[in-house]
Image (cartoon, rainbow, N blue to C red):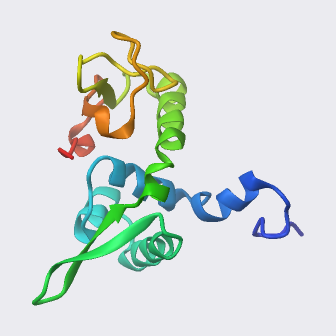
């Protein structure tokens, strides 16, 4: 029988997969990069069970990928914001997006990632196709692409 964790492996990829290898975790991160911060918004956009979402968000907070911040006192309500450790996952999420766009988006990409400064699209290395700049997370504008449907709404960051 195969082990269901990568804990015993001396491999950085396996160790990172302990955190991001579960499918909901990457989708929560995708939504975070799209600007989602509140529990109910994650839940409605993902269609994930509330207990599963609570557990995944808790794990991401525990690992320092997200931080939980109170935004309302009565009743107490919290939002989840990417930390530096979380923002460092952006190249991985972008690589998956480009891979999915290339192989699994027959109607075109659902989202277009653009350089805020000049409007050029980003290539698979997060480089602007118009001006050639290497583009960081805070320099990106996300717009609906030709493969978008209503559920793919882009949230202003």
Q: Name the residue nearer the viewer: 113 or 52.
A: 113
Which residue is drawn at the image coordinates 42% and 71% (left, top)? 57
Quarter of the view holding residue 111: top left
Q: Residue 113, located in which quarter of the rendered image?
A: top left
Front residue of this view, candidates 25 and 60: 60
What x and y, as percent, mark residue 81? 32, 63
Q: Is residue 137 above or below residue 61?
A: above
Q: In the displayed image of the protein, which residue is found farthest to the top?
A: 130
- Extreme-right residue of the structure: 1
Q: Residue at x 41, y 66 (%)?
A: 66
Q: Could you tell whether 19 is left or right of 43 in the image?
A: right
Query: In the rendered image, which quarter contains the N terminus?
Result: bottom right
**Front position in the image: 47 or 66:** 66
Vertically, is 133 above or below 150?
A: above
Q: Measuring from the top left, give residue 17's x and y in whole percent.
A: 66, 58
Image position, residue 137 (x, y; %): 37, 39
- Callout count: 0
The residue at the point 39 percent across, 28 percent down is: 135
Question: Measured along the vertical axis of the image, is residue 19 above or below residue 134?
Answer: below
From the viewer's perspective, is 133 left or right of 114? Answer: right
């Amino acid at each position: 029988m195969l082990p269901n964790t990568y804990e015993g492996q001396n491999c950085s990829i396996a160790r990172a997969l302990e955190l991001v290898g579960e499918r909901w975790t990457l989708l929560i991160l995708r939504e975070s990069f799209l600007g989602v911060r509140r529990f109910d918004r994650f839940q409605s956009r993902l269609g994930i069970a509330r207990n599963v979402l609570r557990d995944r968000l808790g794990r991401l907070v525990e690992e320092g990928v997200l931080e939980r911040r109170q935004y309302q006192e009565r009743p107490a309500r919290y939002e989840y914001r990417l930390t530096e450790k979380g923002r460092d996952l952006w190249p991985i999420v972008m690589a998956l997006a480009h891979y999915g766009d290339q192989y699994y988006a027959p109607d075109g990409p659902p989202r277009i990632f653009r350089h805020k400064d000049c409007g050029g699209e980003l290539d698979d290395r997060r480089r602007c196709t118009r001006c050639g700049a290497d583009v960081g997370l805070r320099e990106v504008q996300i717009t609906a692409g030709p493969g978008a449907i209503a559920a793919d709404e882009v949230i202003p960051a």
